């Protein structure tokens, strides 16, 4: 999870006195608005439960009213506190920041001032059909997903293969994926608060390994959902999946015969099958400032890069060769100490990953995109699947049940501290004599150069266990 406090707001208290509210975002979604005193009280609770060795130091109190510059300074300190609580505790197997989330005020209803009541929510299918489900405005993503599955008669053991996504319909009728709806999110609040009919919620498969298609196709409803996604997902119709004339003829013939399994089997052989395409953004690879279209699938990130000389190049980065990655967020200086007052500002998001370019060279690659957090979630999902497959397990084991019986995805992310982002290539790193000898010493904790709780910056690193399995033959 990526924690950030990108903005503050001046609000009126019960007695009419103004106070500063700090907006806490989790994975890019507003989770709650809290006062400094609320976070301080929560900090004291966590210290009692976990001890001072796990819970990081809390930003100090101030006697006098804070100036705008001091508010900005406190915002940065509180953001680092939330991030440090996640990373340092993760190394000990406990994550107070995640434990603390349910104890913070509910974001959806307090934030949007929406009462708890029954409503009808429309969820789009890839076929273009609309499923209407009756839910509560307070229902979280998993509850809505179960309601949709029940409406479609999708078996319980297949629910975990699908997720809900917030999308935006483009002018050509395709969908731009804004984000995957998070477990703590309230889908009804999320979509209605945007006040824009272009934003919709869509049901889509959430796995990346096409071999799991076989599990989904075992059931009639699963087969229909997958067929609708493959047939209409913009992929083939909008030219994203590459097909030649003969393949196009065969696909059309199978579609006319409604030979769904055969259609999917043929589609699986096509380039970019199952990939999720992201909006155009910017990367520093191979040169800074290059425009790129990134897509995720087949355990890789695919780059279609437009170089400064207008030349187009394509390349892929395998997730198994990513040593670690991080998402960083930054707020423009206009909201910083030089500003006249705290407030809202557009947040800049970056995804950076350290990639094994060759046997003796690791290099950082950075993507600047509003969808950076979603890209990170895609990478983590790929790693999860790889590790499950490596252990001989089933994708079904990636999901566990809550006490009330609802499905919930397990959190296998391992967040660790790491050195600051370095210019690529990393000239300060000692050359590796042999890849095999390097792998014997690789560990998530080994990425860190510092154990200081205060040396955290604004980084949220994810070590990659799948990286440890790479061998010389993979290069």
Image (cartoon, rainbow, N blue to C red):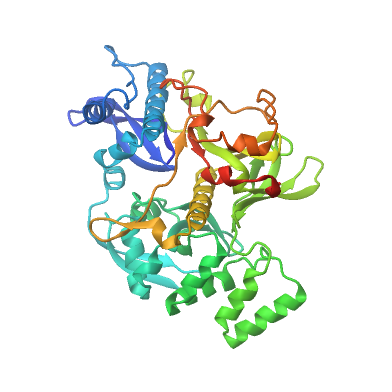
Residue 365 visible in image: no
Task: Identify which residue is drawn at 34% across, 69% down.
Answer: 156
Quadrant holding the N terminus: top left
Task: Identify which residue is drawn at 56% across, 65% down.
Answer: 210
Horizontal side of residue 305 vs 294, given as left or right:
right
Horizontal side of residue 191 vs 366, given as left or right:
left
Q: Nearer the viewer, residue 37 or 89?
A: 89
Q: How many marks?
A: 0
State the image coordinates of residue 29 (x, y, percent, origin top left): 41, 44
Task: Identify which residue is drawn at 44% across, 39% down.
Answer: 2
Residue 125 visible in image: yes
State the image coordinates of residue 30 (x, y, percent, origin top left): 38, 42
State the image coordinates of residue 120 (x, y, percent, origin top left): 31, 65
Q: Quadrant of residue 77?
A: top left
With respect to residue 211, does 30 lie above or below?
A: above
State the image coordinates of residue 379 (x, y, percent, origin top left): 54, 48
Horizontal side of residue 52 vs 383, given as left or right:
left
With respect to residue 257, does 305 lie above or below?
A: above
Residue extending farthest left:
15
Residue extending farthest bottom:
257
Residue extending farthest top:
63
With respect to residue 78, does 190 lie above or below?
A: below
């Amino acid at each position: 999870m990526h924690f950030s406090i990108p903005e503050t707001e001046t609000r009126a208290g019960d007695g009419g006195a103004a106070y500063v509210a700090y907006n806490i975002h989790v994975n890019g979604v507003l989770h709650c608005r809290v006062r400094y005193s609320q976070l301080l009280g929560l900090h004291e609770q966590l210290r009692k439960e976990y001890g001072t060795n796990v819970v990081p130091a809390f930003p100090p109190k101030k006697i006098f009213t804070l100036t705008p510059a001091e508010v900005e300074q406190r915002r940065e300190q509180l953001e680092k506190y939330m991030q440090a609580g996640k990373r340092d505790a993760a190394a000990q197997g406990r994550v107070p920041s995640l434990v603390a989330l349910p104890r913070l005020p509910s974001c959806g209803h307090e934030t949007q001032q929406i009462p708890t009541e029954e409503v009808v929510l429309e969820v789009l299918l890839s076929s273009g059909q609309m499923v209407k489900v009756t839910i509560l405005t307070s229902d979280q993503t998993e509850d809505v997903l179960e309601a949709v599955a029940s409406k479609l008669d999708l078996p319980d053991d297949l629910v975990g293969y699908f997720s809900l996504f917030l999308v935006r319909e483009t002018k050509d009728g395709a969908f731009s994926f804004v984000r995957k709806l998070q477990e703590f999110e309230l889908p009804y609040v999320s979509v209605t608060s945007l006040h824009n009919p272009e934003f919709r919620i869509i049901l889509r498969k959430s796995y990346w390994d096409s071999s799991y298609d076989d599990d989904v196709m075992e059931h009639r409803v699963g087969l229909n959902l997958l067929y609708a996604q493959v047939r209409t997902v913009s992929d083939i119709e909008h030219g994203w999946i590459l097909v030649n004339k003969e393949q196009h003829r065969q696909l059309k013939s199978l579609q006319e015969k409604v030979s769904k399994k055969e259609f999917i089997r043929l589609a699986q052989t096509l380039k970019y099958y199952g990939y999720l395409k992201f909006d155009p953004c910017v990367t520093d690879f191979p040169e800074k400032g290059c425009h790129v279209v990134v897509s995720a699938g087949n355990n890789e990130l695919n780059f279609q890069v437009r170089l400064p000389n207008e030349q187009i190049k394509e390349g892929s980065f395998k997730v198994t060769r990513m040593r670690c990655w991080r998402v960083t967020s930054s707020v423009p200086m206009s909201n910083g100490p030089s500003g006249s007052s705290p407030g809202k500002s557009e947040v800049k998001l970056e995804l950076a990953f350290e990639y094994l370019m060759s046997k003796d060279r690791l290099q950082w690659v950075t993507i600047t995109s509003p969808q950076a957090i979603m890209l990170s979630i895609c990478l983590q999902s790929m790693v999860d699947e790889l590790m499950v497959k490596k252990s001989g397990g089933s994708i079904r084991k990636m999901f566990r049940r809550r006490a009330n019986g609802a499905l919930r995805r397990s959190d296998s992310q391992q967040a660790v501290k790491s050195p600051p982002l370095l210019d690529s290539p990393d000239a300060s790193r000692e050359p590796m004599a042999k890849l095999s000898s390097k792998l014997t010493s690789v560990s998530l904790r080994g990425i860190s150069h510092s154990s200081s709780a205060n040396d955290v910056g604004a980084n949220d690193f994810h070590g990659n266990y799948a990286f440890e399995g790479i061998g010389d033959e993979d290069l």
